[in-house]
Image (tube, rainbow, N blue to C red):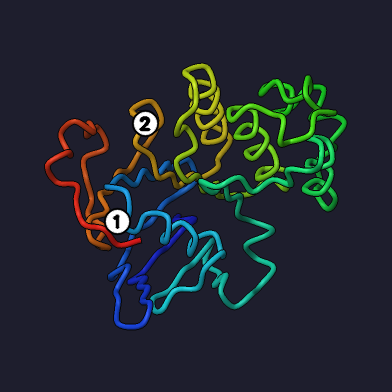
């Protein structure tokens, strides 16, 4: 059974067409990888799938439901980690976590001791203001916040970009654990390690999404990447 059904999603700004008839499915345990040149439309698609942006056309279904008809749906079932920092820079790591855990069924205290917060090493920086955290720790904290409500789908936009090898490995390990627990991931990435986790791969080119073999290497795609959209 598909957790995600995407059908003919389109996005236009005036006469400019950013996405054209995007369609794919993903089931529990699937990791959908989307690759493509910068500006090809990957981030626009992920924003639509996360509820941060409305499409110009097409339909979305999460477990058979239309999330566009229920404003609270995305917040309950989707965890989204954008490229840009979604955290409050003037608050501590702990205060950011409290905001995300305020209506979660999980115990923040327990997760600090034994959950992903401890696994990511965030527990050592709880009293540190976000602006003083390293890029890698900000990304770990962003993921911890995104999964606070135990979402069924995790959407990651270039999570390993500009991070050191240790942080990239931590993210990859967590992705595998999340999938093993029955979650579904949609990720835009240029990292071979992250893409090695994917069960499905797609190339975004000029706002059009095309299927690729799941074992495709980025080096094989260089000549096929092109087109600036958004």
Left or right: 219 with respect to 183? left
Task: Give the residue number, with chain letter if any, for mark 2.
Answer: 191
2 or 1: tag closer to the N-terminus: 1
Question: Which residue is found at the position 50% from the left and 73% from the top?
Answer: 54
Q: Secondary structure at mark 2?
A: loop
Compared to 92, does 122 lie above or below?
above
Question: Which residue is found at the position 49% from the left and 37% from the top?
Answer: 159
Which percent across, then down, holds residue 83?
Answer: 51, 46
Q: Which mark is residue 230?
A: none
Q: CA distance from mark 2 to mark 1?
A: 17 Å
Q: Which mark is residue 40?
A: 1
Q: Quadrant of the N terminus?
A: bottom left
Q: Secondary structure at mark 1?
A: loop
Specify the quadrant of the image occupied by residue 94.
Answer: top right
Specify the quadrant of the image occupied by residue 150.
Answer: top right
Which percent across, then down, holds residue 178?
Answer: 57, 34
**Residue sticking out furthest to the left:** 223
Front residue of 66 and 216: 216
Q: Quadrant of the C terminus?
A: bottom left
**Residue sticking out furthest to the top:** 166
Which percent across, then down, holds residue 36?
Answer: 28, 47
Left or right: 48 with respect to 24? right
**Residue sticking out furthest to the bottom:** 14
Specify the quadrant of the image occupied by residue 215.
Answer: top left
Which numbered disc, 2 or 1, marks the residue closer to the eye? 1
Left or right: 75 with respect to 225? right
Front residue of 186 and 141: 141
Compared to 81, does 126 lie above or below?
above
Within 10 Å of the Cα at label 1, are there few (<14), some (14-19), or many (20+) other Cα atoms? Answer: many
Left or right: 224 with respect to 52? left
Query: Mark 2 touching mark 1, by CB under 8 A?
Result: no
Which percent across, then down, holds residue 223?
Answer: 12, 42
């Amino acid at each position: 059974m598909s957790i995600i059904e995407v059908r003919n999603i389109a996005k236009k700004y005036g006469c400019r067409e950013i996405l054209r008839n995007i369609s794919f499915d993903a089931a529990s345990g699937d990791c959908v990888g989307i690759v493509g040149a910068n500006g090809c439309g990957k981030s626009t698609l992920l924003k639509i799938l996360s509820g941060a942006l409305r499409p110009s056309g097409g339909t979305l279904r999460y477990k058979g439901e239309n999330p566009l008809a229920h404003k609270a749906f995305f917040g309950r079932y989707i965890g989204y980690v954008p490229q840009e920092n979604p955290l409050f820079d003037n608050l501590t790591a702990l205060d950011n976590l409290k905001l995300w855990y305020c209506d979660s069924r999980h115990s923040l205290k327990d997760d600090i001791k034994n959950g992903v917060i401890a696994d990511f090493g965030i527990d050592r920086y709880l009293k540190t203001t976000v602006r003083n955290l390293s890029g890698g720790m900000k990304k770990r904290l962003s993921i911890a916040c995104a999964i606070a409500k135990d979402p069924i789908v995790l959407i990651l936009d270039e999570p390993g970009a500009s991070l050191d090898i240790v942080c990239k490995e931590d993210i990859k390990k967590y992705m595998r654990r999340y999938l093993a627990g029955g979650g579904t991931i949609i990720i835009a990435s240029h990292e071979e390690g992250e893409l090695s986790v994917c069960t499905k791969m797609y190339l975004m080119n000029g706002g059009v999404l095309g299927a690729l073999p799941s074992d495709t290497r980025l080096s094989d795609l260089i000549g096929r990447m092109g087109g600036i959209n958004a």
